[in-house]
Image (spheres, helix red, strand yellow):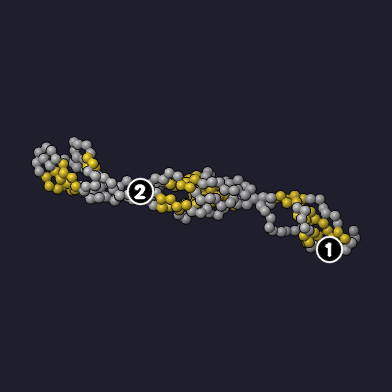
Amino acid sequence: NGAPSTQWDVRIDGGTPIAHDTTLSFGQGGFTFDTNYVFEVRVSNSAGQSNWSGPRTCRTDPIEPATPAPPVCGTITSSTIPITWAAPTNNGSPVTMYNVDLNGGSTTSSGDADHVWASLTFNTPYTMRVAATNNYGTSLWSTGTVCSTTPSAPNPPAAPSCGAATGTTAAFSWSTPTNNGDAVSRFDVIRTGASATNVLMASSHTFSSLAIGQSYAIR
């Protein structure tokens, strides 16, 4: 009304006016993501203040998802560890993908809240963690969950060594193989023409009642 503008005031959600200079733009931080805010402005000059403008509603953008909770291990084998996890708060934008990390080095992606790590080493601990992604970014990694693969069956023993023999008996012995994480609990022995015999934890055995002059394969 004839006098130049000297100040603009901005009001957010009907709160305390915020004094601003005479430029026709305004910026402020501290807002909550994915939330509506109502803005009004008024102008002052040497003659006084105008009324407040009509309201304008603006909405802040969503942000990246919250950090997922640590994954949970399922039924583990000697070479596989299945994991699941709960979907985190998406912070205004649906989760589109999960990143899954093994021991801080091997990373893959999953569209679902589960994954199976395979081809793992038996009787070995692994640390697994998860991060969630939406259209606005990727969360921090979850806390790691440590789960161990189970032991595996023992390696096959080396071929047994033949010992003393008579016309009807044959003795042999063997060494204990690598147990792959779980102590050997029994040995079975078998010869040509007979079924397996459980010899518990012995490291030698003698077959008897054999045919004179007959050769036998022993395992």
- Residue type at tag 2: Pro
Choose mark 2 or mark 1, whichever is in front.
Answer: 2
Residue at x 77% of width, y 50% of height: 56
Q: Residue 218, position in %: x, y?
A: 19, 42
Separation (CA) of disc 2 from disc 1? 79 Å
Q: Secondary structure at mark 2?
A: loop
- Judging depth in this view, the residue of 162 and 209 nearest the camera is 209
Q: Of 52 and 216, which appears nearest the observer?
A: 52
> Dividing the image into 4 quarters, which one contains the N terminus?
bottom right
Quick check: 219 above or below 131?
Answer: above
Q: Is residue 24 visible?
A: no
Q: Residue at x 49, y 52 (%)?
A: 129
Residue 108 location, x and y as percent? 49, 49
Task: Kindly identify which residue carries mark 1.
Answer: 6
* Quadrant including the C terminus: top left
List x then y, in percent, for residue 32. Answer: 67, 53
**x and y percent of residue 45 in the render?**
86, 62
Q: Residues within 10 Å of mark 2 (few under 14, many from 20)?
A: some
What type is the residue that disc 1 sits on?
A: Thr
Numbered mark located on residue 149 in the image: none
**Left or right: 129 as drawn, with respect to 164:** right
SS at circle 1: strand
Position of residue 112 in the picture relative to residue 159 (left or right): right
Q: Residue at x 41, y 53 (%)?
A: 125
Q: Which residue is mark 2?
A: 151
Whichever of callouts 2 and 1 sits on the residue coming sooner in the sequence is: 1
Horizontal side of residue 47 vs 164, given as left or right: right
